[in-house]
Image (cartoon, helix red, strand yellow):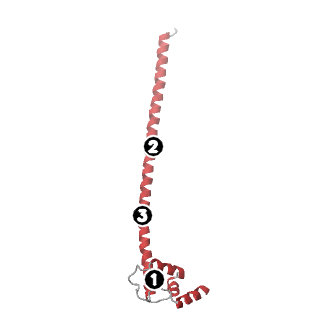
């Protein structure tokens, strides 16, 4: 016997409801997965920002410590010059170029109390120093 029209219509409505429910459940799962993705993305960005801040802090500290070490190097050069050692001799002893020694002396000019402040100041290059430097450069 053939089903009635109302039974067929009821069955079709149920099938449509099941399909719609499955589709809505799938959409809900996809929405939750999308939320998980964006939460993870936010966490990754926060981790990278924190790492960048730490890197900047470490870099600033390293630059400060390196500057202090550079000042210590310059202080040694100034004290050697205070012992009336020629720039070329300082350069040779410290495995630096004469220009590097002069730069350290210039950068530290007037900063170190070990530098004599009289007429024979360590920052003055004597003619003998210049001759020795030329001999070292020519060699």
Marks 2/3: CA distance?
Answer: 30 Å
Distance (Cα) linking label 2 and label 1? 58 Å
Extreme-bottom residue of the structure: 128
Which residue lies at the image location 47% right of the left edge and 11% below the top edge?
6
Asked whether 104 or 2 is in front, the reply is: 104
Q: Name the residue carrying label 1.
A: 77
Residue at (52% x, 84% y) in the render: 91
Disc 3 to disc 1, how far (Cα)? 29 Å
Q: Where is mark 3, residue-wise?
A: 58
Q: Which one is earlier in the sequence, the residue at label 3 or at label 1?
A: 3
Mark 3 Cα shell of 10 Å, populated few (<14), some (14-19), many (≥20): few
Of labels 2 and 1, earlier in sequence is 2
Q: Is residue 89 above or below residue 22?
A: below
Q: Which mark is residue 60?
A: none
Seen at 47% across and 18% down, the residue is: 13
Towards the viewer: 61 or 108? 108
Secondary structure state at the residue bearing disc 3: helix
Cβ–Cβ under 8 Å for marks 3 and 1? no
Query: Which numbered dot is residue 38?
Result: 2
CA neighbours of label 2 inside 10 A, class few (<14), some (14 to 19), many (20+)? few
């Amino acid at each position: 016997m053939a089903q009635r029209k109302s039974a067929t219509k009821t069955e079709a409505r149920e099938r449509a409801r099941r399909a719609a429910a499955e589709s809505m459940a799938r959409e809900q799962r996809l929405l939750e997965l999308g939320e998980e993705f964006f939460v993870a993305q936010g966490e990754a960005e926060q981790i990278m920002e924190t790492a960048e801040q730490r890197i900047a802090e470490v870099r600033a500290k390293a630059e400060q410590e390196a500057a202090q070490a550079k000042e210590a190097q310059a202080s040694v050069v100034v004290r050697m010059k205070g012992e009336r050692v020629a720039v070329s001799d300082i350069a040779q002893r410290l495995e630096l170029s004469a220009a590097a020694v002069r730069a350290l002396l210039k950068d530290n000019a007037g900063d170190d109390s070990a530098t004599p402040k009289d007429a024979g100041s360590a920052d003055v290059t004597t003619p003998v120093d210049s001759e020795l430097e030329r001999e070292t450069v020519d060699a």
